[in-house]
Image: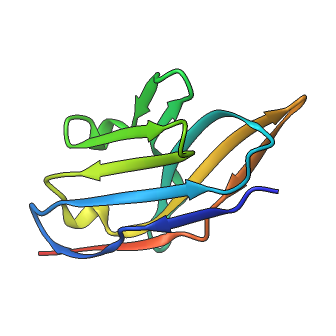
Amino acid sequence: QVQLVESGGGLVQTGGSLRLSCAASGSSYTIRAMGWYRQAPGKQRELVASITSGGSTDYADSVKGRFTISRDNAKKMVYLQMNSLKPEGTAVYYCNIRIRIFNEYEYWGEGTQVTVSS
């Protein structure tokens, strides 16, 4: 089993910045990818950014140029640097990890609230 611990959420003003961090527990697995998703009230959960163990990244069009995802494979951590935040970014942000132990498994963090005030 893998547990994800998130940190870095909070309240910021429009145009401000936050950095989210997520740490994965355990060591008996291989990380295939880690990512961040978000879900605003009344909306569907959506991908914000993802990164493979090799460093390939993918971003939602709405955050390209403003958000940067990075990872530390040795520490099993993933980060999301969020700049130029907008009120539309207000949501619960969830850390996600895909691992492989012969088969592929997926785990989610509990989520961290990000609120962007205008």
Image spot of residue 20 (x, y percent): 37, 59
Q: Quadrant of residue 10?
A: bottom left
Q: Residue at x 18, y 52 (%)?
A: 83
Residue 53 or residue 84, whichever sits in front: 53
Q: Residue at x 60, y 51 (%)?
A: 96
Q: Quadrant of residue 59?
A: top left
Colour scheme shown: rainbow
**Image quadrant occupied by the C terminus:** bottom left
Image spot of residue 107 (x, y percent): 72, 53
- Residue furthest right as drawn: 102
Q: Residue at x 50, y 53 (%)?
A: 37
Residue 9 or residue 26, whichever sits in front: 26
Q: Is residue 40 left or right of residue 35?
A: left
Residue 7 or residue 45, whichever sits in front: 7
Q: Count how many numbered circles sit on residues in the image.
A: 0
Image spot of residue 44 (x, y percent): 54, 59
Image spot of residue 41 (x, y percent): 46, 74
Q: Residue at x 74, y 38 (%)?
A: 99
| In the depicted structure, whether residue 41 falls above or below residue 1 | below
| In the depicted structure, whether residue 106 falls above or below residue 40 | above
Residue 50 or residue 90, whichever sits in front: 50
**Image quadrant occupied by the N terminus:** bottom right
